[in-house]
Image (spheres, rainbow, N blue to C red):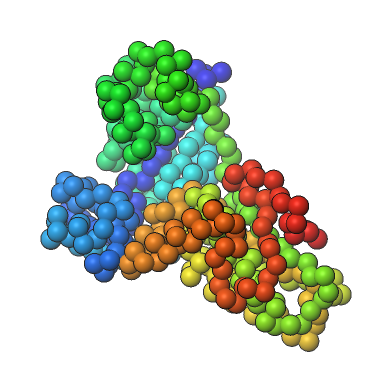
Amino acid sequence: MNSDRHIVHMDLDTFFVSCERLLDSRLNGKPVLIGGTSDRGVVASCSYEARTFGIHSAMPMRLAKQLCPEAIVLRGNSGVYSKFSNTVTDIIKESVPLYEKTSVDEFYIDLTGMDQFFGCNKLASELRSRIIKETGLPISFGLSVNKTVSKIATGEAKPNNQIQIIKGTEKPFLSPLSVRKIPMVGEVTYRSLCDLGIKQIKTIQKMPIEMMIRVFGKNGATLWKKANGIDNSPVVQYTERKSISTERTFDKDTTDIKKLEGIIVAMTENLIYQLRRGNKLTACVTFKIRYSDFQTYTQQKRIPYSAADHKILPVVMDLYKNLYQRRLLVRLVGVRFSHLVEGGQQIDLFDDNDKIINLYQAMDKMRERYGDRAVIKASGMNAKSISRWNPFTGEPPPLLANRRQ
């Protein structure tokens, strides 16, 4: 039952900034911006000191510098952040029976049943203290009967604090808060709610669910439930085996290097697009090759979290070159991305300027409208369609999808 659960939401405070401050204590207490360092760059993350000037994530760096000329601007280092993220994950993994890692800096933990032995608030507090002590990173948490209330509570606990919402007090806790605090409310939904005069959660709580459904469709029901502290969604066990992959078996075994490399490029680009479409990042890349004698070889490499072609494609090509023995006929090649987490946009903002971000967004829009192969590298032009089932959207495979061997 929903009311019997104990769900913790943990979130590392201004994670990227906190990592940089561990490496350089001179940044403590200063307004810090992380992202592309040129004027065409974009803010990926900013400290609380910078936020007081009205700066926020995804703001153009030029505007952020105008708002706060004394801000210290740093280019993001996803390799460093990935290591810190993995350290925190390892601590949580050792300490709790069930957890879900939803992004590089965010976790849900199910402590249901643990109250009989330790007391869930005490257990969560001790875990938070251990993370702070062993990593030096500030972290906040919310504890309640479900994911939605816990996530909102974490937002209220920040910076570097904790809140427990006692069972039965969910509605009064949510009531005075802005509707923007509801996890599913983005800019468009918020504007729609404001147009209806709905700015606080208590207004939704007083409305009949049928009225919300009439205005917002199916999302209206979900919005109403969240506003009333109702959320039965489970904590899904996090596993680093979570992955997406694609393979290509040739009609005729080949040693044609141009054909091979073209197909590998096209496969990889398509898979990276699936990552971005699902708002996912990968931290592990695997390449697979099978020769005509059915001998199969794989090699993998851990990488900083990414969903960018120019970061992942060179890694795939390096793995291919390590494994490829030129004298042998190739039967199959495959690419797999694993250790997936949510949060594609923020890591991408570390690039030096917005040109690459805009390029990817434009490419992806064209693919959504005209198909996966609407935009591809010239080297991948000779590859036949490699569209596959998308594990994020649940779309079935097209009739001409690749065979898997």
Q: Percent position (x, y) of residue 154?
A: 35, 34
Query: Residue at point 53% right, 45% down?
Result: 93
Tell me where residue 130 sits by quadrant: top left
Residue 229 lies in quadrant: top left
| The C terminus: image quadrant | bottom right
Extreme residue toward the front, this view: 370
Give 283 or 254, whichever is nearer the viewer: 254
| Whether residue 62 is situated above or below residue 397 in the rendered picture | below
Q: Nearer the viewer, residue 143 or 382?
A: 382
Q: Which residue is found at the position 64% from the left and 61% from the top?
A: 336
Quadrant of residue 81 within the rendered picture: bottom left
Residue 385 x, y percent position in the rendering: 68, 63
Asked if residue 112 lies left or right of residue 120, the reply is right
| As drawn, 101 above or below 147 | below
Is residue 394 at all visible to an observer of this figure? yes
Q: Residue at x 43, y 44 (%)?
A: 106
Of all residues, the one furthest to the right in this rendering is: 293
Can residue 27 be seen here? Answer: no
218 with respect to 351 (left or right) = right
Q: Is residue 379 above or below residue 397?
A: below
Give the quadrant of the N terminus.
top right
x and y percent of residue 136 in the render?
A: 33, 52
Which residue lies at the image location 45% right of the left edge and 50% below the top edge?
Answer: 343
Q: Position of residue 122 (x, y in %)?
A: 40, 29
